[in-house]
Image: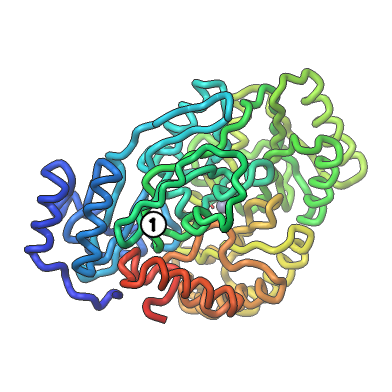
Amino acid sequence: MNSTAKAIPSPCLQAIKDLLGPQGYLESEADRAPFEVDFRGIHRGQSPLIALPQSTAEVVRLVRYCADHKIGIVPQGGNTSYCGGATPHPGNSEIVVSLRRMNRIRSVDALNDSLTADAGCVLETLQEAAAAANRLLPMSLGSEGSCTLGGIISTNAGGTAVLRYGMMRDLVLGLEVVLPDGRVLDQLRALRKDNTGYDVKQLFIGAEGTLGIVTAACIKLFPRPAGMATAMIALVSPAAALDLLAALKSGLGAAVTTFEILPRIALEFVCRHIDGTRDPFGAQFPWYVLAEISLPQADSDLAARFESVLADAIATGRAADAVTATSEAQREALWRLREAIPEAQRQEGAGLKHDISVEPQRLPQFIDEGRALLARIVPQARLVAYGHLGDGNLHFNLSPANAADHSLTAAADQARRAVHDLVAAYGGSISAEHGIGQVKVAELQRYEDPVALALMHSIKKTIDPLGIMNPGKVLEPGA
Ligand code: 2HG
Ligand code: ZN
């Protein structure tokens, strides 16, 4: 099943509509439109019907029907995939399934630090429910106001606190998944310990909907931080940033929650395009880090200890300057400088994104080599390398020189190949947090360990022999 598959015949569409009931689908062109294009407007497809099931039982009926008639299914959460992972192919051969009507929080257990909810719940709503129980749901990312629990599980989302709490994979305790043949994998448990054979649920985390539809999940909560300190630190180089990270880790240990790096050009983009932002420093520096530390208990000493590590870093030349937030408003203003980078970069013209990771200590050298490579291939383009330094994950992005510069678009394939070859030489990942979707299917095929790739294909064939689940995403169909 692929993009050349036939359009779904009308009698099948009618049967699906009957099965879901009048509230259970969207059909008009205007209603379907937002589901047929990714949020960046790069990938466009067609789905004759957007299914909106309201229960796991309805998802089961829908999936069974699609399996019987070999109809492709594209699960879609908040539709913020960077890789076209939730966009249907053209040709009206696939049904988009949105669980947005399945948005019930089933339970919040403060004793076991866990939350169980339907997959259609929006992340922000879950964060609020955790906070109401005096707990922290540590997953936090730019799209938290729209992304859904099912989406962040299916894409194994990262966000800005991975350093401390891990990725989504680390936060899931239990899952409920409707398999491509309509069976339900019922592992919706809040067990902290379960060593019974293979951890099957992990297969569905990060599978981008290619193995089934996640319908509910139980996730870990944590104590709410009572003590927190945030600073932006100016630095001369990424190597100096890593030195600072080491100093923070030895001075404050597990309290280090966020360590995000941004180059001068990213700060300039943000200050140029995003209302209400400004450079917090009086002078210009080549690099900046947004660092945040947090502790579950109130600690009057925390800010002082943080500041003393920073003061020491400045005194010893590891850092050039630092600005510490003294109010929540200042904290938000510093965070805005980091979180607004994708939007600000978008406004600088059609760019090229690389979501890469290498071991953190190798990043400075990677940046130098990558910059030199790109200077040869796309000399006019501007490198905007920023991201989750503490996780070894950089968005090694490029922006054109100006609106008239089309050299980047023309040489995009060559530039991408060069960056990914370099990543491979460093033993890194060509998709650290955004997944594969439809954009990186060939890249996965090219760079993944062949044994791992063969296992992935066998798993896909075993769980989805008809290839109806998110066809053509992650793996080449029928390969
Ligand atoms: C971020 O870290 C996101 O801000 C987006 O992962 C990265 O737009 C990007 O390249
Ligand atoms: Zn990121």
Residue at image x 46%, y 46%? 187
Q: Can you give x and y, in whole percent of width and height, for residue 88 in the image?
A: 29, 63
- In the image, residue 258 sits, relative to residue 369, either above or below, namely above
Answer with left or right where residue 416 lies relative to residue 285: left
Rendered view: 149 above or below 384: above
Residue pictured at 43% horizontal, 65% vertical: 437
Disc 1 element: loop
Relative vertical location of residue 209 with respect to residue 390 in this rendering, above or below: below
The residue carrying mark 1 has its beta carbon less than 8 Å from ligand 1:
no
Q: What is the crowding at mark 1: few (fewer than 14 residues within 10 Å), some, or many (at least 20)? A: few
Q: Quadrant of the N terminus?
A: bottom left
Q: Nearer the viewer, residue 294 or 333?
A: 294
Residue denoted by label 1: 40
Please give left or right for residue 158 compared with residue 368 in the image.
left
Q: Nearer the viewer, residue 194 or 259?
A: 194
Residue furthest out toward the front: 196
Q: How is the image coloured?
A: rainbow
Tag 1: amino acid: Arg
At 89% from the left and 37% from the top, the residue drawn is 312
Image coords of residue 325 (percent x, y): 68, 28
Q: Position of residue 37 (x, y in %)?
A: 30, 58
Where residue 54 sits, quadrant-wise, is: top left
Indicate the position of residue 237 as horizontal and vertical percent values. 78, 55
- Residue 429 visible: yes
Q: Which quadrant does the C terminus fall into?
A: bottom left
At 57% across and 68% down in the image, what residue appears?
381
Viewer-side residue, 298 vs 354: 298
